[in-house]
Image (spheres, helix red, strand yellow):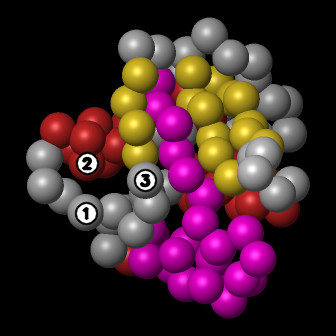
């Protein structure tokens, strides 16, 4: 099976989002999605590509339980709506002018 991924700058998530991703990868904090660190950012798995209701529940959980930003959720939704199974957040990747950008 082949899967698409979105390659996008780490500038599209907030410092708080970055701290959550780092906390997840360095502790026993459980997120409802897979996050894999790499030298320049994170790979984030997008679950529920075929199940809209479950994806919406995931977004709600990420906001209320983990305090991820609306900008982070927008990137997840952007990837999901384009049938991407993964996001590669990379500090050297391109900025997408349609999305919010943060300089932290």
Front residue of this view, candidates 20 and 32: 32
| Residue range corresponding to the magenta coloring | 41-63
The quarter holding residue 61 reads bottom left
Tell me if mark 3 has few (under 14), some (14-19) or many (20+) residues whose alpha carbon lies within 10 angstroms of its own: some
Query: Mark 3 — residue?
Result: 34
Proximity of marks 3 and 2: CB atoms separated by less than 8 Å: no
- At x 47% / y 32%, what residue is drawn? 42
Query: Mark 1 — residue?
Result: 30
Q: Is residue 66 magenta?
A: no
* SS class, disc 3: loop
Tell me if mark 2 has few (under 14), some (14-19) or many (20+) residues whose alpha carbon lies within 10 angstroms of its own: some
Residue 29 appears in the picture as rendered: yes
* SS class, disc 1: loop
User: Which numbered disc, 3 or 2, marks the residue closer to the eye?
Assistant: 3
Query: Mark 2 — residue?
Result: 24
- At x 38% / y 30%, what residue is drawn? 37
Residue that sits furthest to the left in the current view: 27
């Amino acid at each position: 099976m082949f899967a698409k991924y979105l390659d996008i700058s780490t500038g599209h998530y907030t410092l708080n989002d970055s701290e959550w991703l780092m906390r997840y990868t360095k502790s026993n904090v459980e997120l409802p999605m897979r996050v894999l660190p790499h030298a320049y950012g994170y790979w984030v798995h997008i679950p529920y590509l075929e199940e809209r209701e479950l994806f919406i529940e995931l977004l709600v959980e990420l906001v209320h339980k983990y305090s991820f930003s609306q900008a982070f959720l927008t990137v997840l939704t952007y990837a999901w709506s384009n049938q991407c199974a993964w996001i590669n957040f990379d500090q050297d990747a391109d900025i997408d002018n349609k999305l919010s950008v943060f300089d932290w």
